[in-house]
Image (cartoon, helix red, strand yellow):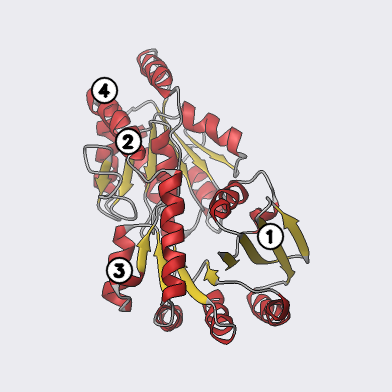
Amino acid sequence: MNIVSLGTDRNVFEPHSAVAKRLVRYGAGVDRYTVVVPCGKTQHLRLSNTVSAQGVASHGKISAFFALYFFLRKYFDSEKYDVLTVQDPYILGLLGYWFSKIKHMGFEVQVHGTEQNTFLRKYIMKFVLGRAHAVRTVSNRLASELKQFYGVPGKKITVVPIFTSVVEGMHERAEQKIQEIEQGYPFIFLTVSRLVPVKRIIEQIHAVRRLLNEGKNIQLWIVGTGLEEKSLKKYVKNFHIGQSVVFFRWKEKNDLEKLYKQAHCFLFTSKKEGWGLAVVEAASYGLPIIMTNVGCAGELIQNRKSGLVVPIGDLEALASAMREILENDALRQRLQTGAREAVTHLPTLEETLRRYRESWQKAIQL
């Protein structure tokens, strides 16, 4: 089976990046897997014997659309594929639908979330999904949304969470964290996220400020960049809590692992989310989770079993959950164990690859 994917993640051209490694795993079960990505320059990179990445020079969304169109029109004259898959149901979806139709390929649409859907985006998404042969998404919650609001038949949908392996050797680290708290070290809340409005990082800062005013010995570590970075830092500065709220730029995987291992609890306050990969990664490190009722909440993270799930936008509930995690050692330890155990029940790499092939097979058959 030969697969071509239209994507947006330029990190695929960094062989040691998480996305590049993930593509190599996903391409292991097919004859050929090619991902085409609009980027700053034309480039080609072979990631494995079966997986390659093709960069198409473009600048901006409109430029990317036309650059991809002219590149693909020429590319498909000489290259033959069985399935065309797109990593978003909008502009890439329109291109994917057109070329899959005229080149007689199966058409698969990936849906990782619907957090920024304007009226126009919803219209395009519904149009594209209505013409897809197969739809792959990351959670049962999102699958239900696709059926209810976009009319996608259940038989077309395959649910495949993003594969995450459990980190070994964290039991000993959990014991060390207990000792750190007992010895008076700050209790560290960690969040890893794009700093954009939908992630509602400001609520975490408000909650931390409230707990600091109660005399709690805590810190909030914020890892990420984005549109709200300056305004969030300004808020922290204005309220003189800079020693307790620490910002980190995006980290290499090894550096991020160190932060996961040092933190005592993971926060996730998004207003809307397809799955929540950062939550899964944090759980794999044995961190107790506090998250809003989005994405993998109720599916992977179950309230008071593998985390604390709070209503979206409820600052009082968020602060209360943080206070409870901070003060209740037994609960914190139970949620640590529950989070790690929950990750072990996610699909294995083999099962993940099987579901990918199942979706691609649907695309060919339909």
Expressed as whole percent of the image width and height from the top left, the position of residue 355 reads: 41, 56
Q: Residue at x 58, y 87 (%)?
A: 102
Is residue 169 depicted above or below 31 in this figure?
above
Amino acid at the residue labelled 1: Ala
Expressed as whole percent of the image width and height from the top left, the position of residue 290 reads: 32, 41
Amino acid at the residue labelled 4: Asp
Q: Which residue is mark 4?
A: 329
Amino acid at the residue labelled 3: Glu
User: Label 3: how many residues lie within 10 Å, few (<14), some (14-19) or many (20+)?
Assistant: some
Q: Nearer the viewer, mark 3 or mark 1?
A: 1
Q: Which residue is mark 3?
A: 145
Amino acid at the residue labelled 2: Ala
Q: Which residue is mark 1?
A: 53
Whole-number angstrom distance, CA of label 2 to CA of label 4:
15 Å
Whole-number angstrom distance, CA of label 1 to CA of label 4:
48 Å
Please give left or right for residue 150 compared with residue 99 in the image. Answer: left
Q: Residue at x 59, y 44 (%)?
A: 250
Is residue 361 depicted above or below 213 in this figure?
below
| Residue 335 quadrant | top left
Is residue 318 depicted above or below 114 in this figure?
above
The disc, 1 or 4, on the residue closer to the chain's N-terminal end is 1
Q: Is residue 114 visible?
A: no
Q: Nearer the viewer, mark 3 or mark 4?
A: 3
Q: Secondary structure at mark 2?
A: helix
Please give left or right for residue 53 compared with residue 227 in the image. Answer: right
Whole-number angstrom distance, CA of label 2 to CA of label 1:
35 Å
Q: Which residue is mark 2?
A: 339
Q: Secondary structure at mark 3?
A: helix
- Return the residue nearer the eye: 49 or 96: 49
